[in-house]
């Protein structure tokens, strides 16, 4: 009976989900899409975990920003610009092409205008990311990252 076998498979999938796998991880394990797993569970009225609480956010100049994976605050709608760059533009004006806004205290949560300096991208990389400079010869990058 094909139906019984399918139910056993869904039971195994749901057991994996209950033991902490995400819907995406279950989907990958069983070679199907995340949406297929979700539909499978919801059609059988299997209870899903609650969605995680929304991220904290900060507001600036009428826009909301949430923290991205690299630690920078990014606008939640529209152009998805970075908060520290928007703060600079608001207070000081446009940022020239090829220039970066540097957090002086290197704290990405401190987005006060007094904590910023505007540097040419090459200078910013040379001073604060020597191992990641695309203009540094490969040998030097390897030594810097060793």
Image (cartoon, rainbow, N blue to C red):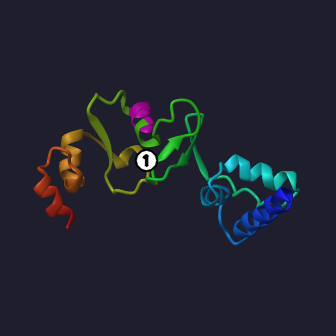
Q: Which residue is rendered at x = 79% and y = 59% of the image?
A: 6
- Rendered location of residue 15, percent (x, y): 75, 70
**Relative to residue 47, is residue 111 drawn left or right?**
left
Element type at mark 1: loop
Residue lying at the far bottom in this picture: please name it: 19
Q: Name the residue under label 1.
A: 112
Of 89 and 34, nearer the camera is 34
Of 44 and 78, nearer the camera is 44
> Does the stretch in magenta take in 87?
yes
Vertical arrangement, residue 126 with respect to residue 146, above or below:
above
- Rendered location of residue 26, percent (x, y): 65, 60
Q: Magenta residues, as a range? A: 86-91
- Label 1 crowd bin: few (<14), some (14–19), many (20+), radius 10 Å: few
Rendering quarter of residue 1: bottom right
Quadrant that contains the C terminus: bottom left
Rendering quarter of residue 106: bottom left
**Relative to residue 82, is residue 144 drawn left or right?**
left
Vertical arrangement, residue 113 with respect to residue 92, above or below:
below
Of 129 and 43, nearer the camera is 43
Q: Which residue is rendered at x = 21% and y = 56% of the image?
A: 131
Name the chief secondary structure element in magenta.
helix
- Rendered location of residue 139, percent (x, y): 11, 57
Q: Which residue is rendered at x = 76% and y = 59% of the image?
A: 50
């Amino acid at each position: 009976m094909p139906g019984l076998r399918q139910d056993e498979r869904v039971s195994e999938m749901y057991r994996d989900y209950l033991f902490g796998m995400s819907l995406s991880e279950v989907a990958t394990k069983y070679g199907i899409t995340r949406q297929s797993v979700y539909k499978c569970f919801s059609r059988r009225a299997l209870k899903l975990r609650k969605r995680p609480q929304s991220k904290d956010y900060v507001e600036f100049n009428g826009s909301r920003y949430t923290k991205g994976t690299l630690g920078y605050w990014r606008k939640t709608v529209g152009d998805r610009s970075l908060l520290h760059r928007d703060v600079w533009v608001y207070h000081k004006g446009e940022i020239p092409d090829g220039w970066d806004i540097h957090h002086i205290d290197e704290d990405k949560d401190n987005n006060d205008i007094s904590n910023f300096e505007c540097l040419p991208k090459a200078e910013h990389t040379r001073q604060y990311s020597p191992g990641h400079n695309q203009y540094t010869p490969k040998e030097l990058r390897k030594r810097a990252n060793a």
